[in-house]
Amino acid sequence: MSEEPTLREYRPGTTFPGVVARTFDESSPAWPEPLRAGEGAPNVLFIVIDDMGYGQLGCYGSPIRTPNIDRIAANGVRFANMHTTALCSPSRTCILTGRNHHSNHMAAITETSTGFPGYDGNVPFENGFLAEILKGEGYNTFAVGKWHLTPTDQTTAAGPYDRWPLGRGFERYYGFLGGDTHQYYPELTHDNHRVEPPKTPEEGYHLTEDLVDRAITFIADAKQVAPNKPFFTYFATGAMHAPHHAPKEWTDRYAGMFDEGWDVYRERVFAKQKELGLVPADAELSRHDPDVQDWDALSADERRLYARMMEVFAGFLEHTDHHIGRLISFLEELGELDDTLIMLISDNGASAEGGPTGSINENKFFNFVPDSLEQNLAAIDDLGGPKYFNHYPWGWTWAGNTPFRRWKRETYRGGISDPFMVQWTNAIPARGEIRTQYAHAIDMVPTVLDLLGITPPDAIRGVTQSPIEGVSFKDALTDASAASLHTTQYFEMIGHRSIYHDGWRAVCPWPGASFAESGRAFGDPITADVLRELDADGWELYHVAEDFAENHDLAAQYPDKLGELISLWYVEAGKYHVLPIDGRGQQRFAEQRPVIAKDRSRYVYFPHTSEVAGSAAPRLVNRPHTINALVEIPDGGAEGVLVSQGGVDGGYSLYVKDGRLVYTYNYVAAEYFHVTSDTDVPTGTHILSMEFAPTGQPSIREGKGTPATVTLFVDGQPVGSGDLPVTIPIMLGLASGVSVGLDAGAPLTDAYPAPFAFTGTIDRVVFDVSGEHVVDHEAELRAALARQ
C-alpha cells in the first residue's frame, strides 16, 4: 500500500498521486486541489476612465468635483508622469497585457487593421491578459464596462468568441463591446450574449450606475460563497467618452462655472497643479493652440452654448465619480478595501471629437454634416439627456489636457500623459504623495505581479508566453526617490511618432503642427518621400526633464541629440513591430482583410434574435436597396416595428401604425422624413416592402448622401411613395445595429412609443443590397477613428 497522498501537490491535469487498484479497500483516493491564491493575496481593481485629460480631475488641479477619485489619491500615490498610447484600444491592450500596443497587434483600432504583425487587430494569445494570469493563480476575474478589444467583425452572434472577455481570462462580463455607446440606451453584452438595459431612462437608468451595480453584484456573488478568494475586477466606464450624458441635477451644479472660457480654466488649473506638486514650480503653460478659437472673439451665444457643454461634461464627470465612490464604499463595507490594490488611469488624453464648435449629435461630425448654432442653442436645455449625442468643442479638450499641448490621437503629451493613481492601504504606506518617476501603461501588469509575488507564467493554456515589456514601479510606490526604471518608450499613432529617453522627447507630428497651420488632417499617406522629409526636417526635440509641457523645440540647438533619438525610435520600432510606418487614410480603411460576416447582396433576418451589430449589417448608405418583411397580420390588425437600424442620432424604421405601413428616415436628428402607405395593411399573410431608389449623386464631403425616392409595397403592389431630399452619407447611427420586430436602444423617432414591438407575427425580413455602392473610404476612416 502506498503512503498517504500529498494533496497539495495534486492539481487537475497532473499525475494522480493516489492508488487505483482492483477494489476500493486496496485503493487510496486523492482529491484534486482547487486553485487557491497565495496567503494574504489582495484583490486587484483596475478603474479605466475614457478620454479624461490630465487636467480634469480635482486631484489633478481641476475645479470639477471628484471627491471619491480624490480619496483614492489621498490614500495612495498620484503619478505626475504616467503615459498611455494616444487611442483607447491600444492603451487598453497595454493595461491588460504589459506589452506595447504594436506587440499586441493593436497599432490603432481594428477598423484600420492591416496584414502586418503590429497591425492586424488580433491580440495574440502569447500575450496573456492579466486576467488569464490571475485566474490561474486562484483569483475570480470580472470585466465590467467598455471592452473594445475584439476585432469589429468578430463582435457578432456568430463569433468567434475567443477574443471576447470570457475568452481572455475573465469569468464574468457585463458591458459594451464597441468604442462608445449611448449612456441611457447602451448596447449591452452579458457574458457572450446581447441583453437590454434593466430600466428605461424614464425609470432613472444610466449606464454608469448600471455598471457599478453589476460590478458590486459580481464581487458580492463570489465573496458571499468564498470570502477568502481574491478577485481581479477590470472596471472600464463609458465616461468620459461622448456622448456626455448625465442627469440634469448633476450638470446644473456647474451653472456659470465655465463662463470665463477655456483660457481662464487653463491658467487656474495650471496654478493649482503647481500648488499640488504635479507640475514643476518653474514649468510653463503650453501655448494657445492655433486650432482653438479665442474665447473673447466668440459671440455671446457661442460662449453661452460652449460653457453649457462644459457644464454638462463636468456634471458627467462628477456623476461618474459618485458611482465609482459607490464601488469603493461597497468594498469598504465588505471589509475588503484596505486589502484591495487599486489602480486608476485614463486611456488617453481628452478628446477633440466635438470639432471646433462642439455638437449636439456627434454623428453629424462623422458624416460631415455641419452643426447649426441655431439648432444647438435650441437644444441647450436638453444637453446631457437621452435626446442628444453631444460632445464639447475642442477648446475644452485643449483645456482638459492642461498643461500640455494637443490631444487624443496625437503623440504630444496632451494625447499620451494621463492621470494615474495607486492605492493599497495594507501594503503601501504613502498617503497623498506625488510620484514623478516616468511610467507607461505597460508597467501596470508587471507591477501588479511584483506586488503579488507572482512570476509570469511560461505558458497559458498551452501557449508559450512572450516576455512582458513593461517594468515594475513597485519601488516607487514606497520610495519617492526611487530611480525611474522605465528609461525609453516609443509612441506611434497613424504615423504620428515620438520617443522618450532619459528626460528627452523627440516628436514627429503630421506635417504642420496643427490643422490650422498645415491645412492637413491626420491619415494622409506617408510615402517614402514624405518620410524622408519628415525624418530630415519634421522632428521636434524637447528636454522634458526641464520643459514639462514641451514648449521649447531644441532640434536646431541639439542636432546630435535629435539624431540619437530618431535612430533610437527606429530601433524600438523594429523591436516592437511598429514598421511599416503607415499614415494612410483611404487605402488603410479599404484594406482587404479576413472577415467572419462578409458583405453580400442578400441578408435574411429573423425575429426574437440578437440585434445584428452594425459591423455585420447591410451597408445601405448611398446604394439602392429593398427591405421585405414576410408577416402575418391577425384579425383586428397589428402594429409595431418590422425592422429598424440606428437610433436617436440617425437611422431608419419600417413599421405599421394606425393600420398603415410607414417608413421613417432620421437624417442625423436634423430632419425626419416619413413615407406612409395610402391604404391600410390587410389581414393575413403578406410581404410588406420598401424600396430605396437613388435619384442623384451623393455629396459626401458636404454631409449629404444620395437623394432618393422611397416606395412602399404590399405583396409587390405599390401603396405609397415619398422623397428623401438628403440622406446620411457615411454612418447611419453610432449604434447602428439591425433589430427585427422592435426599435431597440435609443429610439430613432418620436412617431411611436419605443420599442414599439410588432404585435403580429414576423416570419423573416430580407434585405437586398445588390445595387452599386458609392463609398468614400477616407471619410469612413475619419468617422471610425474619431469614435475611439
Image: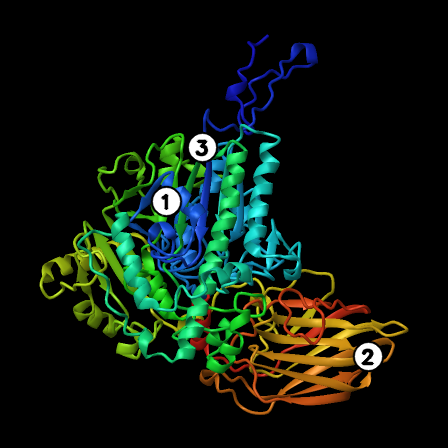
- x and y, in percent, of residue 734 in the image: 54, 68
Crowd around label 1: few <14 · some 14–19 · many ≥20 (10 Å): many
Q: Is residue 204 visible?
A: yes
- x and y, in percent, of residue 736 in the image: 58, 69
Question: Mark 3 or mark 2, which has the lower sequence index?
Answer: 3
Is 635 placed left or right of 693 in the picture?
right
Q: CA distance from mark 2 to mark 1?
A: 59 Å
- x and y, in percent, of residue 636 in the image: 89, 74
Crowd around label 3: few <14 · some 14–19 · many ≥20 (10 Å): some
Determine whether 476 is above or below 82 in the image. Answer: above
Question: Mark 3 or mark 1, which has the lower sequence index?
Answer: 3
For badge 2, the amino acid type reads: Gly
Determine whether 10 is above or below 463 in the image. Answer: above
Q: Secondary structure at mark 3?
A: helix
Which label sits on residue 120?
Answer: none
Residue drawn at point x = 31 percent, y = 55 percent: 417
Looking at this view, is 69 or 9 the one in front?
A: 69
Placement of the N terminus among the 4 image quadrants: top right
Residue carrying label 2: 659
Q: CB under 8 Å between callouts 2 and 1?
A: no
